[in-house]
Amino acid sequence: MFRLAQFAAVALLLVASALTAQDSKNTSDDTPAPTKAKGALPPNFKQLGLTEDQRQKVMKIHASYKSKMESLNEQLSQLKSEERSELLKVLSDTQRTKLREILTHETESTKTSTKIIPAETKKDSKTDDSTKKTEDKKKDEK
């Protein structure tokens, strides 16, 4: 399943880069060039002693790719959300509850936020009781 997500992300990146390449070919030369690029330099570029011209070019390139990456991250986030929804549709109510419990315990032990269950779903009282027992056991072990 993780490989499928990786494959989808790579495919999305390839499609997006092909589309942006086509867009850059279709732009006309009639548009005036911006006078100064705004933004920050990439990490460690301040230490290179760039000329003002180099600095402007680097900032322009960095800003261009930053916006492309933000767009792709939004698309990737949307794909992950859609995947979660479809995966949850396959499961029964009992299986969704069990998965929620498993992920709750996993999240408590690793403190990561890699969940399949959306945050909007509510925990049932059994999950809360088992969560308290797990926390009490962890305290006793310390």
Image (cartoon, grey):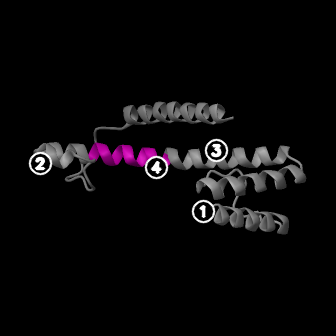
Query: Residue 92 location, x and y as percent?
Result: 89, 49
Residue of label 2: 52
User: Residue sitting at 77 percent across and 44 percent down?
Assistant: 87
Q: CA distance from mark 2 to mark 3?
A: 40 Å
Residue 79's disc is 3
Amino acid under disc 2: Glu
Q: CA distance from mark 4 to mark 1?
A: 42 Å
Question: Disc 2 or 1, which lies upstream in sequence?
Answer: 2
Magenta stretch secondary structure, dominant: helix
Q: Which of the two residues, 108 or 112, is positioned nearer the viewer here?
A: 108
Q: Secondary structure at mark 4?
A: helix
Amino acid under disc 1: Lys
Amino acid under disc 4: Glu
Q: Which residues are magenta?
A: 60-71
Residue of label 4: 70
User: Residue sitting at 65 percent across and 59 percent down?
Assistant: 108
Residue of label 1: 142
Query: Residue 34 location, x and y as percent?
Result: 24, 51
Q: Which of the two residues, 124 or 57, is positioned nearer the viewer here?
A: 124
Query: Residue 20 location, x and y as percent?
Result: 44, 36
Question: Disc 2 or 3, which lies upstream in sequence?
Answer: 2
Q: Which of the two residues, 125 or 58, is positioned nearer the viewer here?
A: 125
Amino acid under disc 3: Leu
Apparent side of residue 43 relative to residue 84 in the rendered image (left or right): left
Q: Nearer the viewer, mark 2 or mark 1?
A: 1
